[in-house]
Amino acid sequence: MEHMKRGLRRCVLALLGVLTLAIPSAAEMTRPAPPPVAGPPPVVPGCEQGCETMFSAALPGGHRLDGLHGVGGNVLAYWDGAHLVDTTQVRGSDGQPYERVTAGLCGAGRCAVAFEFGAHSAAVAALRVDTKITVVDTAVEGVAADVRDLNADGLPDAAVRQSTYEPSFALAPLYWVTYVQQDDHLVPTGCTTPVQAYEEAPITVATGACPTNV
């Protein structure tokens, strides 16, 4: 009888050992699941053959606007972290996408982006970025373009260099026209004095008279 009791005790102990091994510990039960492995970022439409990043402007809430240059012209990509929210191409007065994006500046949900096209032409466009990219004002075109906050109001402004066309486009003096963003429009403030030499873009608003022959 005593032999049977010892055998039964051994069986019970062995069964308890199996159950102990099968039941996960408290630490195992509370261990967090491993984070998902992040996949590669989505390919931006228009950049299937690769794009060069010309600027990347940070926006509130982890958003950003990237200005990209691809084989099909400019591409603007709006991101929420690693999620691609929207893309667009800004088109010129001829309906074709501008060839190259050169600079961009954002503030308060608004952006100003500069482009180049052709041999000696440039443009600037005003954008609104919220749930998507919206070109809120048609691009202003000239021979050079620059974007910056000219009046320190937190909104991106712009400057576009123009020709007086006298005596000809090639020989004419050039001047800058500055624009500030107001109610989703690029509003001209004035012009600099025309000069024939190279001149940096203005860092404050211009208020001078503009040539009347243009």
Image: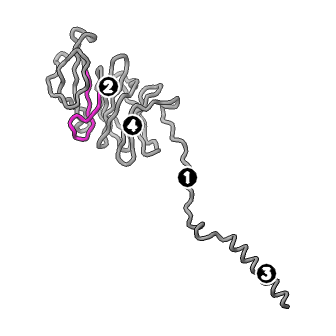
Q: Which of 35 and 88 is in front in this view?
A: 35
- Residue 95 in percent (x, y) is at 38, 24
Residue 29 falls inside the magenta stretch: no
Single out the mark in the foreground, 2 or 1. 1
- Residue 155 in percent (x, y) is at 26, 39
- Residue 199 in percent (x, y) is at 24, 21
Label 3 is placed on what type of residue?
Answer: Arg
Using the image, determine if residue 21 lies above or below residue 35.
Answer: below
The numbered disc on residue 123 is 2
Local SS, label 2: strand
Sequence-earlier tag: 1 or 3: 3
Q: Name the residue under label 3.
A: 10
Using the image, determine if residue 198 lies above or below residue 1.
Answer: above
Sequence-earlier tag: 2 or 1: 1
Real-space CA distance between mark 4 and mark 2, rounded to the nearest whole angstrom = 19 Å
- Residue 119 in percent (x, y) is at 36, 16
Using the image, determine if residue 28 lies above or below residue 86.
Answer: below
Q: What stretch is highlighted in magenta?
A: 145-161
Q: Nearer the viewer, residue 154 or 16?
A: 16
Sequence-earlier tag: 4 or 2: 4
Q: Residue at point 51% right, 41% down?
A: 41
Q: Name the residue under label 4.
A: 56
Q: Mark 1 points at which residue?
A: 36
Count residues near mark 1 (Cα–Cα under 10 Å), then give few for <14, some for 14-19, many for 20+: few
Count residues near mark 4 (Cα–Cα under 10 Å), then give few for <14, some for 14-19, many for 20+: some
Real-space CA distance between mark 2 and mark 1, rounded to the nearest whole angstrom = 43 Å
Single out the mark in the foreground, 2 or 3. 3
Label 1 is placed on what type of residue?
Answer: Pro
Sequence-earlier tag: 2 or 3: 3
